[in-house]
Image: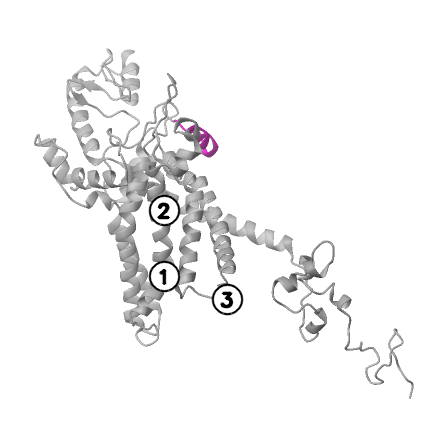
Amino acid sequence: MAEFSDQGGAPGNAFRPYAEPVGRSAGMYADLNPLEGLRGSNGSESGNALQIAGLPMDVSSLTDIELDAEPLDTTQAATELVKFAGWRLLSTIGTNPFSVAQVLLQVQCLPMAVRAEGAEREKDKEEAEDAPDPDDPAYYEYLRARHSGRSTRVTRAAVDHSGYVVRDGAVGRPGYELEALPSEKLAVLRRLVRQPTEGMLSMFKGALTRWIHNMLDLLLQPTLEGVLNEALGLYEAAYVDSAPTALTLVASSVVVGWLLSPLEVVYTRLIVQSGSPLHRKYRGITHALRTIVHEEGGLRALYLSPYHLVPTLIKHALDPIFANLGALAIDRAGIDAYDRPALFAAAGLAWKSLAAIVMLPIDTVRARLHAQPRYVRRGKEEFREFRTCVPTTKVPYTGMANCMWRVIAEEGESLPRLRRRIQNGDGGGVGHYGLRGLYPGLTLHLMVNVFVFGLGFIGDDSF
């Protein structure tokens, strides 16, 4: 029988003529070891990444480990990222009308809107007799006056600096401003579409800003959380089931939320501003950022102002708790998902409802503070007025607590009851306390939670 040997001249096995010897040198693993790229540029043992990671210095001890030499397909990864971003953009556009309706409900000052409605009705009664004949050339001046919110008489009435018609102490509603919005989001969208200065495209205000914010949050928050977990030696924990991993989750959410908070301010301003080209203040994301930084004290005020900083930290500290720690809290309460699945699902519904009850007032206050410019004037510099498509308070809020208290004290009534009271001559704002103003859209939110719970209850055979 012929004797076989390997090409290196070393004694070989007759039955495995092409098998290589077991005792390989460290250099043979240089191309296979994925950590070899972390070695220092000088190739010295002091720069060995294996030593830094606490692994043996001698690579030959890894002979029993199968190393995967397949390179990372960056093209495929980029393609998947583009697909995900595209689907995320479509979902953002699809749900943006309801987000717009929610922001408008949160920002509008209901007493101001109802009082403006009453003044508008009185103004219309007085001017109904002054409407010219459609064949009269003055009729076009009459239409232009109605559209812009000025007096419909040919002789124009006086207006204040915000464009409101002033008549014997009564303030009318400008034409670019919506009437008092009801609490139903579909009704808000109908009003928005029928408004001459808004229209269909207004339902997609801020959609691009919202998408950019969501994509950056999805990329930055898990990355920062992974870095914190690895730095603290928590990278082996697969789930958020301990206090340290929960802390890194909350910390990463707070840091990333604070870094991206200017985009949230821009998103609210783009939605709330009037859609009329004559009254629109911000033309887009970059223009809004530049304008806010220039007019309101720079990035320092945008990031460190208590009007934005405190609500942002509170929101982004509570969001991950309600979004990710519900199952852990229910399990710690002694409710097992396998032993009592129905009770576990009901507890999940209660947890989501609690999240809505706690977070909605915070979101409402944040939206009102975001929609309130705080100009820092330099000398005699004048700024373009920020005109909104819904009535807002004319007295600026001084902080989060002040905003919440004023909403409770001034907007605690339902829209029909407030209309009846103002029509009866009671125009006082303070004294009618209630929490209704802090919870716009809460009923729909709870109904959606119950609907999703019902679908899961029907579709799961374990109940």
Q: Amino acid at mark 2?
A: Leu
Cβ–Cβ below 8 Å for labels 3 and 2? no
Q: Earlier in the sequence, mark 3 or mark 1?
A: 3
Quickly name the residue at label 1. Answer: 325
State left or right for residue 297 relative to residue 189.
right
C-alpha distance separating marks 3 and 1 = 18 Å
Quadrant location, the C terminus: bottom left
Between 304 and 267, the residue placed more toward the observer is 304
Q: Earlier in the sequence, mark 3 or mark 2?
A: 3
Q: Residue at x 47, y 52 (%)?
A: 221
Between 41 and 20, the residue placed more toward the observer is 41
State left or right for residue 304 relative to residue 438.
right
Quadrant location, the N terminus: bottom right
Residue 236's tag is 3
> In the picture shown, does residue 399 fall above or below 380?
below
C-alpha distance separating marks 3 and 2 = 28 Å
Q: Earlier in the sequence, mark 1 or mark 2?
A: 2
Quickly name the residue at label 2. Answer: 313
Q: Secondary structure at mark 1?
A: loop
Q: Residue furthest left?
A: 424
Magenta-highlighted residues: 281-291
Percent across and percent down for residue 7 are 88, 74
> In the picture shown, does residue 258 fall above or below 277?
below
Cβ–Cβ below 8 Å for labels 1 and 2? no
Select label 1 or label 2 by which is in front: 2
Quadrant in the rendering for residue 182: top left
